[in-house]
Image (tube, rainbow, N blue to C red):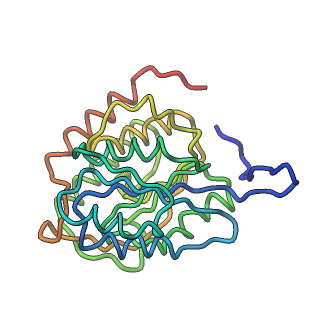
Amino acid sequence: MASSRLQGTMFGSGHILKPLVSIIVPVFNEEKTILELLTRVRSQHHQEVAYETIVVDDGSSDSTTQILRSHPNLYDKIHFREKNGGKGAAIIDGLNLSNGDFILFQDADLEYNPSEYEKLLRPILEWSADLVIGTRLSGGSVTRVHYFWHRVGNKFITLLFNILHNTTFTDIYSCYVVFRRSLLDVSSLRTANWSQQAEILSLVMKRKPVAFETPINYFGRPYSEGKKIHARHIFGVIRRMIVTRFRSIKVP
């Protein structure tokens, strides 16, 4: 388990840097939302942490790339992939660019509001959490009605994850996941598709982290507005959870 206290980095002059949170934003064909989303991300400030925003454009074919190039003030680092490799590939690129003590994932649509960051960071700052998931399914004040079978599938894979890891999460496929960077060896990732989140969480749980959930609001969008995940993705997620849980890895 990682250190139980959240500490900054000491300057030679004796000043202490705030812990850094790397916000990784994978983007693919989000011309309608990317500008507003990054504006919201950039407007977030916290007295006890610092943020860096890392955008990975996953080979967008609409005007997303042009919008990103025109607004360099809205991010700290950016990587343009020549070809679309999927969300997982973009996440790996973002992880390799990150310098943060913690990683926070942010989708490029407007289903999740960056104003929730303070909720996600509270368990880290007050109770030394190593992993925090923002749950859409327990205690949020407002949730847009979304697809029934998505909810059923989410509950099933969350149940299986809890059985495998002896945990009580309610929503492991929420976008809002924050974890201590030292808990994940990026080179150990084997997937670059929708199964990757299950793999990341499985690998993190092998390190016995202090884990929390916190309720968040959710504004899910339909397929007509660009939603990309489909029911067929559940089969790869299930397989990846089981394989990763019982895969032998070197745990420091």
Residue 45, located in which quarter of the rendered image?
bottom right
- Residue 234 relative to residue 167: left or right: left
Instruction: Locate residue 21, reporting x and y percent.
Output: 57, 56
Q: Residue at x 45, y 38 (%)?
A: 165
Q: Residue at x 52, y 47 (%)?
A: 98
Q: Which residue is more in the foreground, 147 or 16? A: 16
* Image quadrant containing the N terminus: top right
Is 218 drawn above or below residue 93 in the view shown? Answer: below
Instruction: Locate residue 33, reporting x and y percent.
Output: 29, 72
Q: Residue furthest bottom?
A: 142
Q: Which residue is more in the foreground, 98 or 157? A: 98
Q: Which residue is more in the foreground, 187 or 62? A: 62
Is 31 drawn above or below residue 81 in the view shown? Answer: below
Q: Residue at x 41, y 73 (%)?
A: 113
* Image quadrant containing the C terminus: top right
- Residue 28 relative to residue 250: left or right: left
- Residue 119 relative to residue 94: left or right: right
Q: Residue at x 87, y 54 (%)?
A: 13
Instruction: Locate residue 15, reporting x and y percent.
Output: 83, 58
Residue 24, located in which quarter of the rendered image?
bottom left
